[in-house]
Image (cartoon, grey):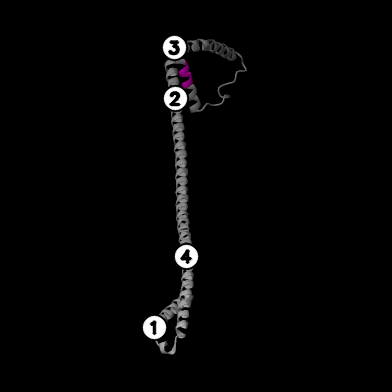
Amino acid sequence: MWRAIQQLQTRADPKEKGESKSSAAASSTPSCPTKSSLPALTKDDSAGKASQEDNKTDPKKWAAATSSNLLRARNLTQSLLTKLQQNEAAEAANRNAEQEHAEREKERLKAKVKGQAKMHEGIINTSFQCMQDLDDALRWTEDSVTKLTHERYAGFAALQVCEKRMKMREKRPVNENFKDSLQEALENEQKILLTARQDIFNV
């Protein structure tokens, strides 16, 4: 670093010599402007130029200023990187939050659909069971109607036999034509068969 500073000083020396020669020549000419004709410098400009001149002439000050500028640039770079990392972390957190929200919404909709499907499945199973019960009841009813029809036919045949026996007994001789236990049994049988036939018709 010191060698670079010395090279910069050696490069700056010829310029300073040339400036001194030109200033001497300018002073020798009568048309050189006076100090009153030059614009006045402000305090900040004079201080800045003085500090620059001091830094150029003093290698330690120049090195300190350069180190300070490098440190400030390094700090700015570090703060910029930190800010970028914070922004990336915030963006990643937002992305993760959006993904989690989307997953929760997806699970909620899936659970809702499953609940509706389960409810519909229950309704379908109940309806199917009712249809089966109706089919069984219809089949039992048809069987009952068939059995009642057969019973009615059988009762009608028994009634015909009973009435035929009663007509045959009416043809008995006068001395034998009286009401005995057999006649009472036939009349009771006829009454029971007629009542049963009427009940079947009422069904």
Regarding residue 200, the answer to whether it shows in the image is no
Disc 1 secondary structure class: helix
* 5 vs 84, nearest the viewer: 84
- Could you give the CA–CA distance between mark 3 and mark 4, rounded to whole angstroms? 122 Å
Q: Which mark is residue 2?
A: 3
* Quarter placement of the N terminus: top left
Which residue matches tag 2? 74
Given contact means CB atoms under 8 Å apart, are the residues at marks 3 and 2 in contact? no
Label 3: how many Cα within 10 Å (few below 14, some 14–19, many 20+): few
- Could you give the CA–CA distance between mark 4 and mark 2, rounded to whole angstroms? 101 Å
* Amino acid under disc 2: Arg
In the depicted structure, whether residue 19 falls above or below residue 89: above
Residue 175 lies in magenta, yes or no? no
* Amino acid under disc 3: Trp
Tell me which residue sits at (46%, 75%) in the image: 158
Give how far across and how far down residue 83 sits, in percent.
Answer: 45, 33
Which range of residues does the magenta coloring cover? 51-56
N-terminal-most mark, 4 or 2: 2
| Quarter holding residue 69 | top left
* Amino acid under disc 1: Glu
Which residue matches tag 1? 184
Tell me which residue sits at (47%, 65%) in the image: 143
N-terminal-most mark, 4 or 1: 4
- Could you give the CA–CA distance between mark 3 and mark 1, rounded to whole angstroms? 154 Å
Q: Which mark is residue 80?
A: none
* Amino acid under disc 4: Asp
Give how far across and how far down residue 22 sits, in percent.
Answer: 58, 13
Label 2: how many Cα within 10 Å (few below 14, some 14–19, many 20+): few
Tell me which residue sits at (41%, 80%) in the image: 186
Disc 3 secondary structure class: helix
Identify the residue at the far right of this view. 31
Label 4: how many Cα within 10 Å (few below 14, some 14–19, many 20+): few
